[in-house]
Image (cartoon, rainbow, N blue to C red):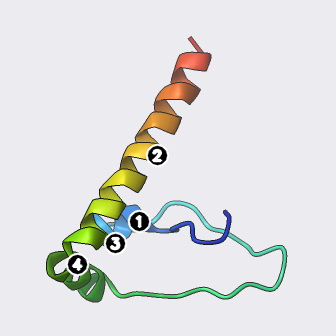
Amino acid sequence: MRTGELFGLAPALDGAPYKAQLEAMTPTRTLFVSRPDFIQEMETHLEVATELLLQLAGFVRNVEDWLQDRI
């Protein structure tokens, strides 16, 4: 993960548990946002929801590329 990247996006959206864990290799500052606050932020600020959709599209594209490389 790099600065500004989101972790735990799927659980923030669907409420299911996250299957992975991360451990910081260097001193790290993180921000926890509860699911209700996250959903409210997206409902209140369309630009936040739009940016989130763009990031999700990037994740999907990366998985597609990864899968295509293995075919």
CA–CA distance between discs 1 and 3? Answer: 5 Å
Q: How many marks?
A: 4
Quarter in which the C terminus is drawn: top right
Q: Callout 1, which amino acid?
A: Leu
Residue under pointer 3: 12
Callout 4–callout 3 Cβ contact below 8 Å:
yes
Q: Where is residue 8 shown, x and y percent of the image?
A: 46, 68
Q: Is residue 5 left or right of residue 8?
A: right
- Disc 1 packing (10 Å; few <14; some 14–19; many ≥20): some
Quarter in which the N terminus is drawn: bottom right
- Disc 3 packing (10 Å; few <14; some 14–19; many ≥20): some
Q: Callout 3, which amino acid?
A: Ala
The outermost residue toward the right is: 26
Residue under pointer 2: 59
Residue under pointer 4: 39
Q: Where is residue 2 shown, x and y percent of the image?
A: 68, 65
